[in-house]
Image (cartoon, rainbow, N blue to C red):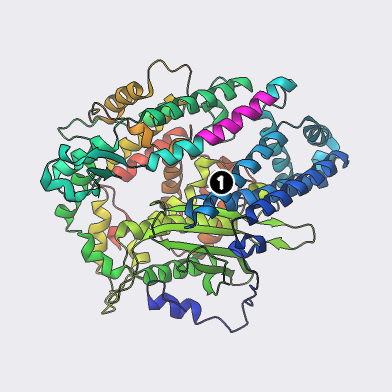
Amino acid sequence: KDDIGGMGWERRVCGDLGNGDVFSLCCALQGLFGVPELNCPEGFQEAQNRALQESEQLVQKACSTPPGPETVMIFDQLSDGLCRVADLADFVKIAHPDFAFREAAEEACRNIGTMVEKLNTDVELCQSLRRLLADEIVMRSLDPETRRVAELFMFDFEISGIHLDEEKRKKAVNLNVRILDLCNEFLSGTHLPNKIDKHVLPEHIRYNFTAEGNYLQVAGLHADCPDDLVREAAYKIFLYPNAEQLSRLEELLASRNSLAQLVGYDTFSHRALQGTMARNPGIRHVWKDILRNSMHCKLMPWDHPYYSGALRAERYNIDPGLYCPFFSLGACMEGLNSLFSQLLGISLYAEQTQRGEVWSEDVRKLAVVHETEGLLGYIYCDFFQRPDKPHQDCHFTVRGGRLRENGEYQLPVVVLMLSLPRSTRGAPTLLSPGMMENLFHEMGHAMHSMLGRTRYQHVTGTRCPTDFAEVPSILMEYFANDYRVVNQFARHYKTGQPLPKNMVSRLCESKKVCAAADMQLQVFYAVLDQIYHGKHPLRKSTTEILKETQEKVYGLPYVPNTAWQLRFSHLVGYGAKYYSYLMSRAVASMVWKQCFAQDPFDRAMGERYRREMLAHGGGKEPILMVQGMLQKLPSVEDFVDALVSDLDQDFETFITDS
């Protein structure tokens, strides 16, 4: 019963264990995530070899099975076997503190990824699926989810170039493998610090940066530093162009474009947006409609984050130090537990881990339990800072849920990774309001994974179009900013005093300060992403396009000799899809206002939310899920209005009315 940041959560969650009325604890396996062979780095080779061997057997089985629902089941088994290694390795390669584990995991990722691309161009395997899709009688007998999964597998074949001749299919595979390598290289480069001779900087600001001999390392933008000169120096040094990183980005964009055109699309954007709510790259014109007035001011790009925060703090007196004592990690987890219990009938229980099951001793394991359905899955909470751990908040699927061949359900396993400060001798882990909101955001992804209990792992949980996947997480931000929700858990860790209502109101109102500029920045990112993945060859260099787009869409001037795009890590995972954050926020805004603003604990609405939006994972068209929840099909104007209405200074929410 180690304290994870607040005794309140431990009493509530751990104290309920041992009753035997919900589920029994059974975890005797050793190795990462309970996978026996992963008790050492070499285990990845063993796990990878087994997955590849099983995939060969399943390919043969798929090719010899008559058209029917079993065909789809075999394809899903094939997908599951490869994903169980690749997804786990995808997390380990960036988060494990042992370099040998990270290196072994990265190699496994690459090898499994190569196999996936080969399977996506396997003509005989594709023919077995074509026979099913061509059999109208059998297709009519399939349930909607099975039909959609079959169509999604065929879609994977098509965007990989299955229709091409053998030489071009091999070229497509090689391009995909090269793109995978470039993505890994580019992602690594986005985080690397830049060095500068320490004598270049004034002596009185050098202490802000890490010294290394005669050099200073600049590893970030120092956006919150009150010293203007420190922010300016950090911006210009950290964003100074790196020739190797620039070359990687140019090759990545060109390779993506070559792949898209090879398999029959005009641009990579056209390929990437197939099956999404947006559907085509014209989406960037929608986001431009949000920009009612461009921002024209004397601020420089390194000023906006600091001064917007300072303005919020000054106008509303929201010094994070005043709020942190009310947001201990334990209290926040209690709040999530209470919210999920009231809204969805779900509780979180701490479970003891076995030796070797986790990669750091401060990782905690939660069992997610429904009041009538029992155990739904597991969440590993990797919440605390440590050396070499990426400073980013993420949700990782380690194992997807699916209905196994023996009738049992394969429970989903996910990781939530945050970068929270550790507790001290005198205080538990205390969260700033932003950290608390991020915790709610990531837990929204986790609930999607737990409740997207589909028959097939190919569409389980967050395995859905990117512009829908962010809806559950962003919706949780609205709950995190509602006084009625916050009032249930925000207590001073020393006195137990509840967070005063006027402090919550001030905090929520402060978020509207500079909100339009913040959204303008998101529109700039989305538009830039679409241009980079649009028609090739690009008419200018990526830096010239950045300068032009920034000054046209964002309004703040471009700073010479900087290349912010080389730090834009979202170009890897969200290539041509960065707009998804805006699209998802619009949907979340509509769902909140229509369904939860009146009562954030409405159980009937919570059940509808689960039934219409969470339960399907990617097994249903996303726009149909939105339509089911809102009871209407939203128009383009509805999407834009939802975003703009949140920016209206006169827009009164129940946050301030409560």
Q: Residue at x 33, y 25 (%)?
A: 549
Neighbour class for label 1 at 10 Å: few (<14), some, many (≥20)? many
Q: Where does the C terminus fall, quadrant-wise?
A: bottom left
Indicate the position of residue 91 as horizontal and vertical percent values. Answer: 53, 52
**Magenta span has 222?**
no
Which sits in the foreground, 593 or 252?
A: 252
Indicate the position of residue 228 as horizontal and vertical percent values. Answer: 14, 42
**Magenta span has 172?**
yes
For residue 199, above or below residue 380: above
Q: Residue at x 51, y 62 (%)?
A: 359
Does the image show residue 481? no
Indicate the position of residue 632 as horizontal and vertical percent values. Answer: 53, 43
For residue 324, above or below residue 472: below
Which sits in the foreground, 94 or 260?
A: 94
Q: Would you identify the image quadrant in which residue 63 lies? A: top right
- From the viewer's perspective, is 208 left or right of 584? left
Please state which amino acid type lies under the numbered disc 1: Glu
Which sits in the foreground, 564 or 359?
A: 359
Indicate the position of residue 360 as horizontal and vertical percent values. Answer: 48, 65
Which sits in the foreground, 206 or 518?
A: 206
Instruction: Look at the numbered disc 1 and give the secondary structure of its residue.
Output: helix
For residue 176, above or below residue 369: above
Residue farthest front in this picture: 213
Q: Would you identify the image quadrant in which residue 135 lies? A: top right
Q: Residue at x 59, y 84 (%)?
A: 19
Q: Provide the residue span drawn in magenta.
A: 170-182
- From the viewer's perspective, is 615 left or right of 584? right
- From the viewer's perspective, is 579 left or right of 321? right
Q: Residue at x 60, y 27 (%)?
A: 175
Instruction: Give the prevailing secondary structure in the magenta stretch.
Output: helix
Q: Which residue is mark 1?
A: 106
Does the image show residue 434? yes
